[in-house]
Image (cartoon, rainbow, N blue to C red):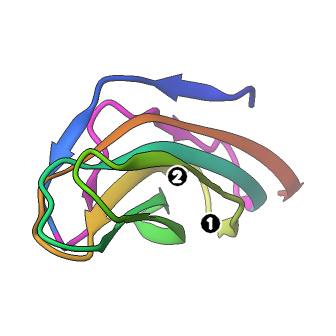
Amino acid sequence: MAPTAAGAANGFSSTSWIPFTGAPTFTLPRAGEYSYLFGAMLQASGFTGTYEVYCRLNVGGTGSGAIKFVAVGQYNGGQVAGAPFAYASGAVAVSMEVAAQTATLSNAALGWFTITPRRVS
């Protein structure tokens, strides 16, 4: 699958994993082993001290490959990317999720991913 990106900023302040609003989604057509490359722009909006902002893939309801950005100042942000490996048990959805280390207003934007089949059934 070619890289897929989607754009608007997603403001959140959750310490639990929540859907990355506006990020791409994809349904894997077959069970198998897949490699993923994904990333996003993560940013601190509110700031009371250094904290981490996270992004990960959700493959069929299971989180995979969490990546983080360490915010050290208000409006501090950057691009992050990761490359997890996961097994899909069938035609499952792939989506992105975000969370923060503390309940501080954060942003996630420009979520993208590429999926490469390694062995499918």
Q: Nearer the viewer, residue 80 or 44?
A: 44
Q: Position of residue 50 (x, y in %)?
A: 28, 73
Place of residue 31 in the rendered image (x, y in percent of width and height, measured from the top left): 70, 58
Relative image position of residue 86 (x, y in whole percent): 68, 68
From the viewer's side, name the closer residue of 51 and 85.
51
Name the quadrant of the N terminus: top right
- Asked if the residues shown at circle 2 and circle 1 are in contact, with their CB atoms under 8 angstroms apart, the answer is yes
Whether residue 21 appears in magenta in the rendering, the answer is yes
Disc 1 secondary structure class = loop
Q: Check if residue 1 falls in the magenta segment.
A: no
Sort mark 2 into few (<14), some (14-19) or many (20+) by Cα contacts within 10 Å.
some
Q: How many marks?
A: 2
Q: Which amino acid does the dot numbered 2 rest on?
A: Val
In the image, which residues are magenta? 15-32
Q: Residue at left 26%, top 37%?
A: 21
Residue for point 48% across, 46% down: 78
Quarter of the figure with residue 65 = bottom right
Give the Cα separation between the discs numbered 2 and 1. 7 Å
Q: Which mark is residue 16?
A: none
* Quarter of the image where one finds residue 52: bottom left
The reply, left or right, for residue 94 in relation to residue 31 is left
Q: Please identify the dominant SS of the magenta region.
A: loop
Label at residue 92 = 2
Q: Nearer the viewer, residue 93 or 106?
A: 106
Q: Residue at x 29, y 73 (%)?
A: 51
Q: Is residue 69 left or right of residue 116?
A: left
Identify which residue is drawn at 12% across, 54% down. 46
Quadrant of the rendered image containing residue 20: top left
Mark 1 residue type: Ser
Which residue lies under the disc numbered 1? Answer: 89
In which quadrant of the rendered image does the C terminus lie? bottom right
